[in-house]
Amino acid sequence: MTPNNTKGALVKKGFLYCAGTFAVLTIMSGIAAAQVRVLPGDIRDNRSTGSFFNRLEVELRLVGDVVADAKGVRVVVAKAVDETGRDLMPERERENEFKEISSYERENLKVNIELKNPSRRAETVQEIAGTVELYVPRRDPAATVLVPNIARSVGRQAASPGLKAAGIEITIWNKEQYTARRKEEEEKMKKAFEERKKQAEKEGEPLEDLGSALAEGLMKAFGGLFEAFSQMEENGLALNVKDPKGKLVSIEFEDAAGKAIEHQGRSSMGSNDDKTFIYDFKEPLPTGARIKVYVMTQRAVVKSPFKLASVPLP
């Protein structure tokens, strides 16, 4: 949508205001122009008396050519007020990491934002403004790191200058190796627990039960995914990812020629900086299969300021 083909449009201070109940924004990113429209989708208004879960959820629909190349997205809201002037910005800032975008989501990309409840008298959100950030790795060669020949790295940490530069460590296990490592860790923790138990009994102090101690220890050792291990199939791979700088956006697999290899399912659990992923594949990975890791870089991020006006409440 541009000023040339939109009846009644008015360009003002970089925003494109359209006749209707909301505004859309045409943005420029770097030298190349990237047109993005930010439109309100479904609105969930949970206004009620005494409810602990009161909140306003606004769905944002992102439309534009640049969306087709995006691998991740996040929304940073700077201002949100209803028609009475009530500030709708959350009291606590939520974790705002990039959300991975799957291939099918790019055709109809939607992102939810969560705000405080509007006034019971309000019929519209007067303004929601902020920035949409799209992660577009093709804009920066350093944003894509290839780990060649997975078979050579199975059972150990993947050697990669690109991963090292990003501060990311990826250790790869097949099912047999993961099972063996878990049993080894369990035995170590049982011995450590027995020592702690003897010491606690000697000092007359209470001690947590063995089950809780093992669960806590295994979660630390495997990024928390030991509970999901039973779901790992014969052709599966476990990737333990240590990412203290929060640079990892997504992981894909491809054959030696660069053709994408689709996985049958993925499980993940653990903390943001130490997480384990389990990938299941229909067939064994072909010879020369590699991992494609998408890493966050400043040059790969397209920032798009947006402003929505007079968004009607349900």
Image (tube, grey):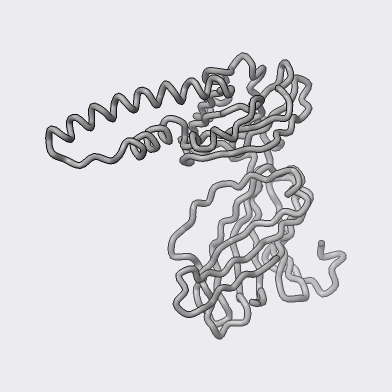
Q: Is residue 275 left or right of residue 263?
A: left
As drawn, the residue found furthest toward the top would be 152
* Residue 143 in sight here: no
Where residue 170 sits in the image (x, y, percent)?
Answer: 54, 26
* Residue 93 in sight here: yes
Q: Nearer the viewer, residue 205 or 225?
A: 205
Number of numbered labels in the structure image: 0
As drawn, the residue found furthest toward the left would be 203
**Image quadrant containing the N terminus:** bottom right
Residue 282, image quadrant? top right
Where residue 207 sits in the image (x, y, percent)?
Answer: 24, 39
As drawn, the residue found furthest toward the right would be 5
Q: Nearer the viewer, residue 107 or 180?
A: 180
Where residue 152 sits in the image (x, y, percent)?
Answer: 61, 14
Q: Is residue 241 left or right of residue 288?
A: left
**Image quadrant containing the C terminus:** bottom right
Q: Nearer the viewer, residue 217 or 48?
A: 217
Where residue 279 sits in the image (x, y, percent)?
Answer: 63, 32
Q: Residue at x 71, y 72 (%)?
A: 22
Q: Residue at x 50, y 36 (%)?
A: 225
Residue 183's place in the image compared with 133, above or below, is above
Residue 51's place in the image compared with 194, above or below, is below
Q: Is residue 92 left or right of residue 127?
A: left
Q: Nearer the viewer, residue 105 or 214?
A: 214
Q: Residue at x 75, y 23 (%)?
A: 255
